[in-house]
Amino acid sequence: MEKVLEVKNLSKRIGKREIIKNISFSINKGEIFGFLGPNGSGKTTTIRMLVDLISMDSGSITIMGKDIKKEREEALSHIGAVVENPELYGYLSGYENLMQIARIRSISKERVDEVIGLVGLENRIKDKLSKYSLGMKQRLGLAAALLSKPNLLILDEPTNGLDPNGIQEIRRILKTLSKEYGMSVFVSSHILGEVQQLCDIVAFIEDGRITSIETMEMVKKSSRYFLETEESDKTTSILENIEGISVIKVTDHGYILELGDENPSHVIKQIVYKDIEVISFARHEKELEERYLELIKGGIR
Amino acid sequence: MFSGLIKNEYIKLFSKKKTYIILGLYILLSIIIAMIGESFEKSYFRYKDPDYLIENINHQIQYEKEYLDSIQNDSSIDEDEKEMLLKNSNEHIETLKEEIKRLEERKKTGEYDWREEYREQIAANESIIKEIEAKGNLSKDDLNQVNYMKQDIERLNILLSTDTSPEDENVNTGINYLYNNLLMVTSAFLSFGLILFSSDSVSGEYNPGTLKFLLIQPVTRIKVLLSKFVVTALSSVTLILGGQALFFVIVGLIKGFGKLSRPMLVGQEFEKVIYDGFEMFQRIAGSGEYIPLWNYILRMLILEIFLIITVTAFIFMVSTISKSSVVANTMCISIMLGSTIVYNLSSSYRKISHLIFLNFGDIDGIVSGSIISNTGKVVFTPINVIIVCVITTIVFVLVSLGVFKKRDLLI
């Protein structure tokens, strides 16, 4: 699989504080990579280093095989990014803001119009940016990042200020870009729902360290099963005697069973055999939030 | 790519309201300068009106007579001295009366023959020179006077040969307007106008942090910064000189363009003299040469261009380092005001002032050479000023680039 971004042993110190501590990760072509962590964990600092707004103390960043330090301009030519807030020129129109980037990157006016259509800003594009809502600014920021059809799109909290429709639309656009055009997307966020619905891979960052990098399947994977049945002491005692169930927890409509490595078909067979009235039996998929709280001590600050 | 950056900077500059406000103020200043020229012209004509002059001389005669009376009645003055004073006073009254006669004549004919007056002045100067030279064994003072007279004859001869009347110097013509504009703009308004115009060129992009968008594009930081400097400097030069050219034409079309060949003295030389225990710089009589006014103004314009670029480079450097427009503004204004104050207070600072661009506002003094008498620095010449401007600009731009290239952008 083609590696679009490769970060190796990246560290950064600002003043006396070590902000980023030896982090490494990579993003493949077409992947949507979530960068999840509490406020102040080092997400934006990492992004700033990815686009060379700040220098790194040690480590390396390679974009499409180009080192950001040694071949800075070539590396940046593959990136479209919005770092923190989409701050563009308030006294220029939305269109002129995009043209500013188009002129630097030699992008055609047709492409500018195409991107404006993609983010749905056709009706307001001639207005001054100072009259835009935060959501519109987010869309324009996304448009600016997309202008050059980058191989890697870097977005910092991209749904800040968007209404639910807007969030859904941005999600749809990003998924299309990744699936149909093979664009890789790096999204930093502290909003769990956003990352869960959007990303293929998620890296958990806390206090400048990446604690784990997992695919969304791995995150959701669990050996807990939900047994829907009428709860009674008799049923509880039967379940306690079935081999393979390590933990039993009573809930409103039945039981949550922790099976460990036990084969679930073997367990369900015994449940049915011992005359427990089963309404349903299903694997309980873990939410990202649970995994987040497992990995990030202290949870969301 | 660089041309794209340049175009971007121009669009940004001319999309800001501030640019138009400063332009408006500049036009207002240009109009005020034209009005000052107009009022100068009016008072010139008023003072040369024969009626006004006659009235004035009559006042003088009146005063002189009162003085005569007071001397005659003063017993404290001894007789010999009294006699001499009375003689002088009477002679003075006679001269004044003759002057009135001449003016009455002029009133009658309605004409003022300035050529004749110049010729008379030349003849008078020549006769004084002859008188002094006849004495033989000339003292330094005598030589000075001779040289002074000779130079004055040269000036009068040029005025006659170029048919330049006294009016040409005093009427609000296009060329005189341009001269006054250059004088006032460079000495008082240029630095502050440039601070307003360009102090936010880099610092303004820190808050809000639009600089981030610019720096994540695939262009080097050096190109980004250079494009800003080129556009700021070029726009400043174009707008300031454009305004001056525009008003030169407007005033010229309304009031005539004036005599471009009027002689102007440049390259004056000075010598150190001790006067009343103070060290002073005195012009060496007869030093310097006359050049036509157009050439003089051209030299002023060239100096102005170099000055604009250097001041812009300085403001640009402060703007790059400070990260905040307010800080940049305050720093630039403080440094410029501070320099003026120190210049006036400290003679040691004046002695090194020829090396510091902040003291180059007096371009008239630099072109004519008169700045040497204020600073005591004979090397304060137009060429040296240009060399200092070029070196200073290069240093400022290099410092800006060095700081900007390495800086972590935490905005």
Image (tube, coloured by chain):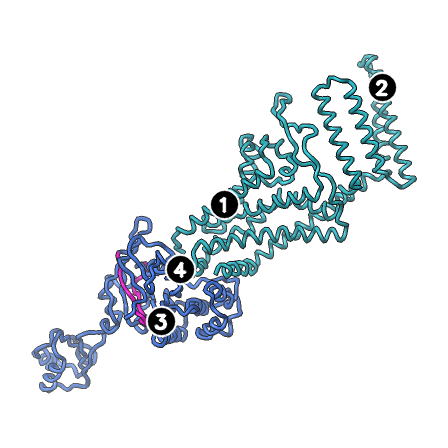
Instruction: Determine the CA span between mark 3 and mark 1.
Output: 44 Å
Q: Amino acid at mark 1?
A: Ile
Mark 2 — on which chain does it sit? Answer: B
**Measured from the top left, where is residue B392 in percent x and y?**
51, 42
Which one is in front in this view, the residue at disc 2 or the one at disc 4? Answer: 4
Labels 3 and 4 within one chain: yes
Q: Colour of chain B?
A: cyan
**Disc number placed over residue A73 in the picture, else none:** 4
Labels 3 and 1 within one chain: no
Instruction: Determine the CA span between mark 2 and mark 3.
Output: 107 Å
Which image quadrant for residue B91?
Answer: top right
Q: Amino acid at mark 3?
A: Met
Residue lying furthest right: B108
User: 10 Å neighbourhood of mark 1: few (<14), some, or many (≥20)?
Assistant: some
Q: Which residue is mark 1?
A: B394
Element on which disc 4 rests: helix
| Front in this rendered view, residue B196 or B366 | B366
Q: Which residue is mark 2?
A: B86
Instruction: Determine the CA span between mark 3 and mark 4.
Output: 19 Å
Q: Amino acid at mark 4?
A: Glu
Answer whether residue A24 is magenta in the image. yes
Which one is in front in this view, the residue at disc 1 or the one at disc 2? Answer: 1
Q: Is residue A2 left or right of residue B170?
A: left
Which segment is the magenta one? A22-40
Q: Which residue is mark 3?
A: A183
Q: Output the letter for the chain in blue.
A: A
Instruction: Determine the CA span between mark 1 and mark 2.
Output: 68 Å
**Measured from the top left, where is residue B115 in percent x and y?**
83, 37
